[in-house]
Image: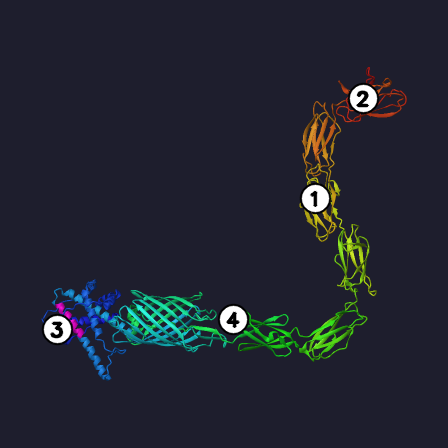
Amino acid sequence: MAIILKRMCVNFYVSVSLLLSPASFANVEFVSIDSDLDDIINTGEILLENNQTKNLIVEKSEPKIENIAIENTKFEEPNINIVEQVENEQKIAEKSAYNTKKTYDNIKKQVSTRPTKIDENNIVISSSDNNSSYITDEKAKFEQEQAKSIEIAQTASSIIDKKDKSNAIKSFAVNYITGKINEEMIGYIENYAKGARAEINLRVDTKENNIAGTTKILIPYTTDDFQKTVFAQTGVGEFYNNRWISHAGAGIRFFPDAKSYTDVGNLMFGFNSVYDYDLSRYHQRLSVGAEVMYKNLLLTGNLYERLTSWRNSKDFESGYVEERPANGYDIKAKFAIPDYERLAFTAGVQKWRGDKVLIFGDTTNLETNPTIYSGGIEYSPIPMLTLSAEHSKSSKNKKNTSFNLKFNVPLYDDDALKRSMNPKYAGLQNTLQASRTNFIERDYSIPLEYRATPNKYYITYCGYIPDDKHCFMINNGFHEAVPDFPVTVKTTDDCVKLDNNGNYITNKDGKVYATIIGACKPTTTLIVTAGSVTEKFPINIKNLSFKLKALPTAIERHEKSVATLNGGTLAANLAVTWRLKSSRGSLTNQQNTTDANGVATAEYVPEPTQIDGEKVDITATVYSVEFETPVIIKVFGNNPDDISIDRTVIGENEYAKVIYKNLRPNTNVTFRIDGTGGILTDKTTDFGTNASISVNEAGEAIIYVKGQDLANSNLKVFAKNSDPLVSEKSVNLNIKNYTADMTLPTWNSSLYGNHQNTIDYKENFKIKVSNLMPNTTVTWSATNGATPNATTSQVAKDGTTEMDFGAISDFAIKDTDISIEYNKNESVKTSMTKKLNLYQYQLNLTTDKSEIIGDEQYVATLSGGKPGERVVWTVTGDSQEISKEEVFDENGKAKYTAQGKSPFDLGILLNVNALKKSIKKNLPNKMPSNFSNYIYANNGCAGAGWNVTLTRVGKTLDYTLSFSLAGDYNWFYSNTVTLNYMTNPTYEYSAWYGRDSSGIKVDLRQGKVWGLYCRAGWGQIGTLF
């Protein structure tokens, strides 16, 4: 652009110089333009950027043009610096309304003088030879330059006449530069509209994550009235799944309001038709389209119709899927932002018809009659380059985003190529002026419709089902199940027969089940046909038609069994080999060839020494396949397991079922019991210890043993059948009535020894019970405050259980009863109770003195207690406490320390409470005395009715001992009396033969008195020593 502007400024400078110096026309010297002309260039650029050029181009009003006469008057050359004047006036564009109209007139004149046909170098071509054309072109150029010079001269002449020549020159400069800019723009648009174009498009699809490209070429022709442009378009490109597709088409576009190439009005509409050819897969398609553009909005629509039919598809396994172009239509709108046409938005919809149509190149997700909605954005930084992004979404929510890089290359002119890289012309292709040569908006990818190839199917084996049933799956080319389709199955062997004669119809899952209903061979090959496809499947046959059966299957040693091989009519006249498989006995009367009905027989004869239950295997071999049937030798009731009992242990009122089997029906069996504790019964009648039972049709004799409430015992039940060669059979039975054994705890004490069945107070304890019925429940209870931690416990497999109890804290309780309820057997429950003692502490109160005199100290000790338990001391009398222990120590003892106190009249009574027990003890207390404890009476003391009074010095006690003396004093006896502060004191008096002076001796064994006096009623008769 700068080059264009500088060239225009040169012309302007030269023209002004000629006008100012008419005399020097013949000697014009072209000088270079200095850098000051850049401001003029900048002024032109401002006009272009402000869209002044565009306004000049589309101006419709006809300006009034004044004819200015050129006078030959001489005038002085003004001293005008044009560059300086342009620099000083920045707002000159605002005063150029008249100049704008004049510029429009110049543009109109240039367009109207356009040659009829112009080649790519803008040279006029006529019907004459090349030299004539060249001369004509040069002449036309000279005439155009001459006309421009005249115009400049006229303008300069008008400037000379104006008084304000400075402003006139400024206006002239601006108008001149603006006109030159418009000429350049018009030329580019004109060439753009006339010339051939090429487009290269690079596309990235997120669905396939690949890069593909297309290229197109368009050649236009515009009629002389500028209202119709006919064009041809062709191209080739790579699309989904590596498909190369070419196209060729033509169209016409109408511009009803067009006045020239550039003045095209506001409306365009057109029609086109395009032929598509798939170079990779040879598909053909034809489309017809229409387009309408109003101002910046373009609407297009296309109908697509295929020209070729089904072909084998390369997107699937060869031969199983066919493809063809999908018919459909599309509608698309494109809107360019006004005044910023380089940015445009698109929206469109496509509709394709077909049961399985490929969209976005994804063959795993074909859609039925899909509708695709799309939206996108385009941006052209320069005319040559367009960046676009488009997001598409199908009606079934499949998505694809494509990014396009489009190169729009003009092919007709180097200058046009340069201009196509100029950002100032960006967005031109989105305007009506350039719509003459825009490429057709349509789909170029030829979406494909698929179908499974008719009568071409996948046949697969889907498994063996018992009883020789075989499954086959029929799938079409898309591996979809084919329902309700006929399938035939044949075999390679005539002796193998199928159900339904081998004709089947697939179910909703596309499966058929062929069952072999007859076969003489263990293997064959199934030939399966579906449509035009046939597959072979070797199989094994597990259930052949042959059946081998021996009757009777159980025989005694004197009987025979006949083995019959039957293969049906399919197995007629086949060789048969008979043998015994590791068995005793022999086969006789063997038929070694099947008859017409496929039957052969042989007889089996046992040996006399064979035992009961011995198995004999008879085999028959056909086609190397061995068939086998057993025969059992029966010696009735002689097997160890022929007699059985359902329970080996029963209790009172419980039953054990005895079954003697493998017997000959309707014979009798004799049962008996050896032992005690049970009787035989049929639950209706009790038979005692012997019974006779009839064998039922199943060969069994059944009887029951009922348990009794007797001591536990072991007994045997014997059974004897009617065969004298079979020995008596027996089963063992245990009569078990559980009697619990409760183990009470033993209290082990380091102080008081070990005590069985005893617990201590305030200690938890545990009770264990054994000899119980396993896996039963025991219920617990207790008395006198003993509480189990749970009401029930489970019996272990070893017949034991146990229960934890909480401690008993009440010392008044001496024992507790522990009770359980348990299963005597499965039917009967019983209970038991045991007494559990609590250890009874034996408290003992002792003193270290038997009496105290005066204020001497004494120590009382309470022993035999529970360590840690409380002791309460209560002492009365003339005693004063020193210390006491209120709990038993670790040795079970507690001590009380005190001393006598004045007046020493009252005896001391010790009272101790512990472990809810109370213990008392008297301790005499007296003053010191020298009196003897003995009194001797003289002879005068003898006789009956004598009284003895015990007296303390200075005081007589209130208690009197009364006794009588009679006869000769030759015996000894004692008596008891109660005195104050003494418990049961005894005294004795004795005499020896003769009434001598030894007198009577009185001994008070408990306690001491201070004096004794003997009184005989009338006075003192004894002496006190």
Q: Tell which circle, 2 or 3, labels the residue nearer the N-terminal end.
A: 3
Q: Where is residue 156 in the image (x, y as percent from the top left)?
A: 14, 70
Q: Residue at x 53, y 75 (%)?
A: 457
Which secondary structure, mark 3? helix
The residue to which callout 3 is attached is 22
Q: What residue type is labelled 4?
A: Glu
Q: Residue at x 40, y 69 (%)?
A: 350
Q: What residue type is labelled 1?
A: Ser
Q: Crowding at label 2, few (<14), some or many (≥20) Cα neighbours within 10 Å?
A: some
Which secondary structure, mark 4? loop
The image quadrant that residue 585 belongs to is: bottom right
Disc marking residue 480:
4
Disc marking residue 781:
1
Q: Tell which circle, 3 or 4, labels the residue nearer the N-terminal end.
A: 3
Q: Crowding at label 3, few (<14), some or many (≥20) Cα neighbours within 10 Å?
A: few
**Res. 393 visible in picture:** yes
Disc marking residue 961:
2
Tag 2 and tag 4, C-beta contact below 8 Å: no
> CA gap, disc 2 to disc 1?
61 Å
Tag 2 and tag 1, C-beta contact below 8 Å: no
Residue range corresponding to the magenta coloring:
147-160
The image quadrant that residue 17 belongs to is: bottom left
